[in-house]
Amino acid sequence: MPGDANWIAQLENQRRTSDKNWTTALLLSIFLGPLGADRFYVGRTGLGILKLLTIGGYFVWWVVDIVLLLTERMKDDNGRVRTKPLARRTLPRG
């Protein structure tokens, strides 16, 4: 049934999507990225420590992580992708 396939696709998409807040991760990456705060937040503690010790990979890793978040490619500790929230739609007032 077509409805069942859509439900299964939505469930698979939820399993691939991280439960960490994208906006929080982005703000942490922008403001505290050289200290590894974004990697600690998404559960990648080892990478967070490495980023902290190298001051964000001499700021290169800091920029790469911001780009990874903006392109929805940064993964959390379970390998799930951190995605942007869906845009809220408002109804036109008539």
Image (spheres, rainbow, N blue to C red):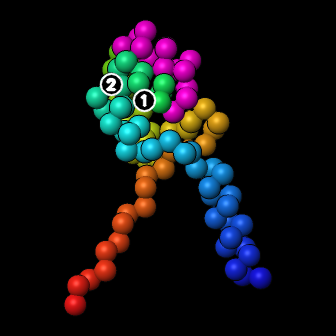
Residue 38 magenta-drawn? no
- Tell me if mark 2 has few (under 14), some (14-19) or many (20+) residues whose alpha carbon lies within 10 angstroms of its own: some
**Quadrant in which residue 79 is drawn:** top right
Q: Which residues are magenta?
A: 42-55
Circle 2/circle 1 CB separation < 8 Å: yes
* Residue kind at label 2, given as amino acid type: Leu
Q: Callout 1: few (<14), some (14-19), or many (20+) C-alpha neighbours within 10 Å?
A: many
Rendered position, 66 above or below 34? below
**Residue 17 visible in this rendered orientation of the protein:** yes
Q: Is residue 67 visible?
A: no
Q: Which residue is mark 2?
A: 32
Looking at this rendering, what residue extends furthest in the right direction?
A: 1
Give the vertical position of 83 relative to 12 (above or below): above
Which x, y percent locates residue 35? 37, 18
Residue at 28 percent of width and 29 percent of height: 31
Query: Which residue is most to the left?
Result: 94
Residue 25 picture location, percent across and down: 41, 37
| Distance from Cα at disc 2 to Cα at disc 1 | 7 Å
| Dominant secondary-structure state across the stretch colored magenta | helix
Left or right: residue 17 compared with residue 39: right
Q: Secondary structure at mark 2?
A: helix
Instruction: Quickly name the residue at label 1.
Output: 38
Give the answer, above or below, for where 81 lies relative to 90: above
How many marks on residues? 2
Magenta-colored stretch includes residue 46: yes
